[in-house]
Amino acid sequence: LIQLKQPSMKVPTAAVPLLFLLNCATLPPLCAALSTLSPSESAQLAYGRLRESLSSLANKATLSPEIIIPEPTDPTALLLQASEVTNLSNRMRNNAKANAVFISGSVNSIRSFCAEQETARGNFPSPLPVIFCESSYGGEESADFADIAEAGASGVLHCLLEGKEISSVEDINADTKLLSAFEAARDNGIQLIPEIVLSREATFDEADVTAFVEAVAEKCGTEPAVVLLTVGTYQNEDDNKGGVGGEVKLPPVAKTLKKRIPILGSVREVAGGGRIGSSVNKFKECGYTGTILRCECLPGVRMNPDLDFVGGFWSAAIGDLKSTKSKTFNFRSKVSLDKDVPMEWYNYQKDIMDSGALGGPDDAGVTPLDSGSGDYQGF
């Protein structure tokens, strides 16, 4: 008589993050087991998820929008908003292809957004990490970490010294809330993302930035999943034409620091004239892993209640910024063609110009864009 031993059902610890990505609909027993993870295990999964989503791959900067979802006061509007948030969530994943989403709003809006993201579990694109923006504009200052975790968020954005500009390591050491907030987030199974607001007046080098990040890590007791650097306090737009006012001196990030931890920068240029794209490129040149496209980038009202417009804007903006299509095109052929292509192209262009379709000499410098109707020249 040959006895067969029942194979062991133990799952290696290293395999847990991979198993978590499997489709919950196909493996209900496994998902039921994973739902009983301890807060420390959930926090570790959130840590890995944020690191993976916000790390730069193939030297491409990550792009994540900050979205404000105002809380309606009318009961009917509240019911209608649930479907709008669901549609917004879908567009951020499938159309914009964002790396993560930072949301300011109520816990209910976070819950609706995360619920839609979970429907993509096991598919491609996979669910995006959602980060709750603590007390940022429409955020709930008194929101409990347990409620945020239960809603499905992976992390909370926490501004050091309540947004006060920092110019030295001593300023960071003077923060009395960072450690308790970091531990509270971790105890509830999510991660705290520190935001350091640097002084606009001071000039910082790579050593200064490294010292700031190391001071934050020492304060937290360990390295955070991600660190966000913002230059200067929030400012008003300059009539939608000049960003947030004045040239911003970006502090450079050392390659050694970038390899250890994702360092993100805040982009706050108002859309139009290629300002957002130019700002993203500057951050990339300075060594940043990626950027958070703050709500100031949205033309008009930051707290726009029209979530369909917000979703359309970010889908177009991030899609354009991530596009690999060449902005210029050159063609050279060593093969003899039946037609003289350059001459054919010249004749075609000449016919168009002669027809007046492109306007006349008096139209020089006149833009056909109507900014009042939502037309903007590039992002």
Image (spheres, helix red, strand yellow):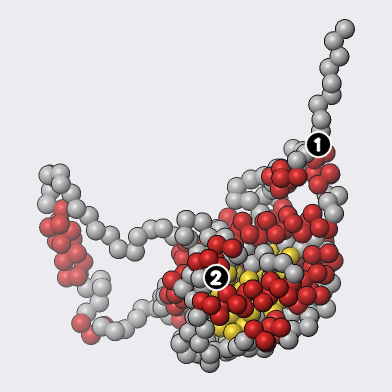
* Label 1 sits on residue: 10
**Residue 151 visible in image:** no
User: Which of these two is toward me, 19 or 341?
Assistant: 19
* Label 2 sits on residue: 291
Location of residue 336 in the rendering, given as x and y in whole percent from the top left corner? 12, 44
Q: Quadrant of the N terminus?
A: top right
The structure residue drawn at horizontal position 83% and vertical position 17%, both measured from the top left corner, is 4
Location of residue 353 in the rendering, given as x and y in whole percent from the top left corner? 19, 70
Please, what is the three-letter code of the amino acid marked with disc 2? Thr
Please, what is the three-letter code of the amino acid marked with disc 1? Lys
The structure residue drawn at horizontal position 64% and vertical position 84%, both measured from the top left corner, is 169
Q: Residues within 10 Å of mark 2 (few under 14, many from 20)?
A: many
Location of residue 317 in the rendering, given as x and y in whole percent from the top left corner? 50, 68
**Residue 284 visible in image:** yes
Q: Is residue 76 above or below residue 330?
A: below
Question: At numbered mark 1, what does the secondary structure look like: helix, strand or loop?
Answer: loop
What is the quadrant of residue 7 in the picture? top right
Q: Is residue 136 above or below residue 354?
A: below
Question: At numbered mark 2, what does the secondary structure look like: helix, strand or loop?
Answer: strand
Q: Residue placed farthest to the bottom in the image?
A: 201
